[in-house]
Amino acid sequence: MPAQGSRSSTLRKTRAVRDAVNDYREKCKRDQPPCWLCGQAIDYDTTDPYSPDSLQVDHMFPVSTHPDHAADQENMRPAHAGCNLSRGNSMTLPELGTTSCDWEALAT
């Protein structure tokens, strides 16, 4: 049985996954949603795929741990290349931000 990493690499290269990612990328370019990890605008006009502000299609549940969701657009999220690389293969979800009040102090 192949190692898990090589299986996810193989899955990313299937035509179904490539087509789903490309379709999702086109929807993002059309609608221009913000990065799901930091909430900031993505540079949809850049042609430099190595720019940290460029669009990368991120899988909320990593393909390496959830290969059955590789082509599922419900699992895809728009992300900055830099944010996606920082997140890596973790299941960490984006922070909700700063609370407006110290709710724990109010509860006591």
Image: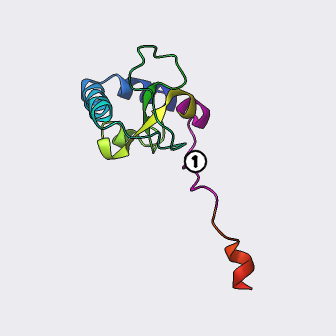
Residue drawn at the location 39% of the way across and 38% of the way down:
67
Q: Position of residue 84 (x, y in %)?
A: 53, 33
Q: Is residue 101 magenta?
A: no
- Check disc 1 and report the residue beneath it: 92
Up-down relation of residue 31 to residue 14 (above or below): below
Q: Residue at x 30, y 38 (%)?
A: 31
Where disc 1 sits, the SS reads loop
Q: Give me the residue at 75% from left, 78% from top.
A: 105
Q: Quadrant of the N terminus?
A: top left
Which of the 4 image quarters holds residue 69? top left
Give the left or right position of residue 94, taking residue 10 as reference. Answer: right
Observer-nearest of 78 and 98: 98
Task: State the residue at coordinates (47%, 36%).
Answer: 41
| Residue type, numbered disc 1 | Thr
Chief SS of the magenta region: loop
Direction bottom: furthest residue: 108
Front residue of 63 and 40: 40
Crowdedness of circle 1 by 10 Å Cα count: few (<14), some, many (20+)?
few
Q: How many marks?
A: 1
What span is in magenta? 84-98
Residue 85 lies in magenta, yes or no?
Answer: yes
Residue 3 visible here: no
- Residue 76: x and y in percent read 37, 40
The percent position of residue 66, horizontal first and vertical second, equals 43, 43
In-front residue for pair 85/30: 30
Query: x, y percentage for residue 79?
Result: 47, 35
